[in-house]
Image (cartoon, grey):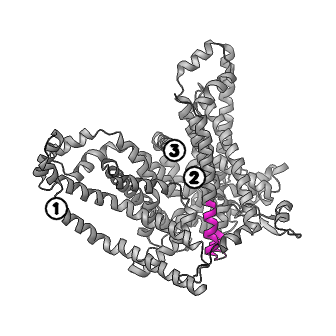
Amino acid sequence: MRKQKIGLIFLEVLAIILLIVFFYPFYIIIINAAKSYNEIITDPLSLPENIFQIFSNAKEVMEKPNINYFSSFMYSVIITFVSLVAIGIFSAMAAWVLVRTKTRYSLIIFMIFLSGMVIPFQVVMLPLVRLLQTMKDITGIPFKGTVHGIILAYIGFGAPLSIFLFHGFIKSIPIDIEEAAIIDGCTKSQVFFKVILPILKPIFVTLLVLNGMWIWNDYLLPVLILGKGSSVQTLPLSVSMLAGNYFKDWSLILTSVLTAALPVVILFLFAQKHIIKGMTSGAIK
Amino acid sequence: MANEGNKLNQIGNNVLYFFISALIIIAFPVILTIQMVGKFIDKDLLVFKNKEGEGKVRKFIIDKWLGETYTAQNNRVFVYFLFPALGSFLLFVALPFIQGLWFSLTDWNGLNTGRESFIGFENYRTIITDYAFMYSFFRTAIYSVLNILVINVVAFSMALLVTQKLKGKNIYRAGFFMPNLIGGLVLGYIWQFIFNKAFVEFGGALDPSILINGDTALIGLIVVVTWQYAGYIMMIYIAAIQNIPQDLVEASKIDGANMFQRLKTITLPLVAQAFTVALFLTLVTSFKQFDTVTSLTQGGPATQLPAWIGSIYSKDLLPVVQSTNLIALDIYSEAFDNYEMGIGQAKAIVFFIVLLTFSLIQVYYNKRREVEM
């Protein structure tokens, strides 16, 4: 018993050391974001002289004219939010009709979606960029550098995984519920929106987390569809713009990095349980 | 030859135009038509004639209540509900994928967009005879193998650690998971600063920065990705370890098994399914690594081509190559820096086939090792 206790204390210490190692990079970023340029050059490991420097650094980042930090933050929020809602609802709708319609077509369409899961983005990116241009030539609607263009692309790329998860879940919902709703006078689409959609909440949360992390942090799709320096920017794009333009000005880069990471970290602290559960259950299925 | 290719290509373009116009301009009228026609197609007449069975009678009554036949409504909802997801998927994923197969066989170079001609498997021949691509492939392979090993060993050890009866285990879990929240691009900048500015202060092997040497830069990249990804993989292992029935563990304790015996005979076989998932995820993310490496090293530093690759391509003078130019990065720079879209697309397809093959092999072998409970 005693031996076991010593072992546990040893493991506890080991875990704490590991935690410190994991947090050390965060610590370095935070202390250096609160320093001036010269301070970082002379000693990056010391504590900052004036902790409030971080606010003036942040202000400087916000005010850089060619970065438009605030607007890119807002665009990131809008793009992530709209894409998440759209992916969630559209995939749930598609998955539901695919499960409940037992024909050859629904199986084939489901298989097409599944095959989309194994296609890496690199394979479709070059034709996609060209396709967006072609679509503009044909319809006159610009898709490159616009919010709706990138949201539509996210729906396309997010659909396979989401449909797969919804499909598995909807199969486990008994059809009796839907039949009861129809007897009670629901139309087919009312059955979905009033009966099925509320039941899908757990998968919805999982997908919000999985897709949300991906879209918020994504760099490659925005750089291709929006392009660096266009009027519509997301946060990763403007961080990379800033790092490119103010090369080696670490006090600015680190502050911008911190502001880009902060919203997600804050969200994590509040919804930790959902996020961890969402990410792992998404992976295991 | 070129003329013929152009003709072929024009046909290809016309088909493409037709497809897109159909999707965007004709789609809505089509849906409306289906809706209208749906009201007239009354397939339920068949059911009406043959009304044995409770379900069919019930269906008939429901149809009459709603004023529209059940089947017609079903068909309409099927199209409506499927359209947004399927449409954007076909337009943004499936169509570019199929187009990509064609573009990899053309001399598309960004300047001749729309006028490119069919050149057969020329691009594939170019990339096979390209020592830089070979090198980039080789580096990606090394990186992936090391990365998969390190991440899984670290993640599994951490999972074992935080499933013990520790006081702060929830804090540890959340803490180890935290780096995963930060995007790859941002992470690269963070670690570029840490390697280049902070760690050099410690001196020793860390000074000068490990990012200026090709091999240590690859190790640096593995450190960064492990820091980011191990917490996530750990969560997958934790879920699996917690699913192990406690009576098995207790029975083995009574039988006098020590910790290592328990690990070997109970834990490892029972989390085999989690291993399949974790190995698959790490394989795919390592292979597709793009964001972090763009911001951490930009593909550099430059180094000399290894002699053995040089000898395959019979280069006496070893040329300079980029040491962390992983495939995903190579595809991007081929297309957007060199404007060789056709070659870039061919590389992407080779990349896709290799990735698909390796992940299928991996899943196949691991599936065989799993234990059915």
Query: Residue A47 versus residue B60: which sits nearer the camera?
Result: B60
**Which chain letter matches label 2?**
B
Q: Which portion, as a residue range, is magenta?
A: B332-351
**Which chain letter matches label 1?**
B
> Residue B347 vs residue B199: left or right?
left
Give the Cα separation between the discs numbered 3 and 2: 18 Å
State whether residue A115 appears in this view: yes
Q: Label 2 amino acid?
A: Ile
Q: Label 1 amino acid?
A: Lys
Q: Label 3 amino acid?
A: Ala
Q: Position of residue B82 (x, y in %)?
A: 33, 58
Give the Cα separation between the discs numbered 1 and 2: 52 Å
Q: Residue at x 43, y 64 (%)?
A: B90
In which quarter of the view is residue B367 placed?
A: top right
SS state under label 2: loop
Residue corresponding to mark 2: B182
Residue corresponding to mark 1: B39
State whether residue B304 appears in this view: no
Both marks 3 and 2 on one chain: no
| Mark 1 vs 2, N-terminal side | 1
Give the Cα separation between the discs numbered 1 and 3: 43 Å
Q: Position of residue A173 (x, y in %)?
A: 32, 40
Magenta span contains residue B346:
yes
Residue A283's tag is: 3
Query: Residue B273 versus residue A219: which sits nearer the camera?
Result: B273
**Which chain letter matches label 3?**
A
Question: Which quadrant: the N terminus of chain A?
Answer: top right
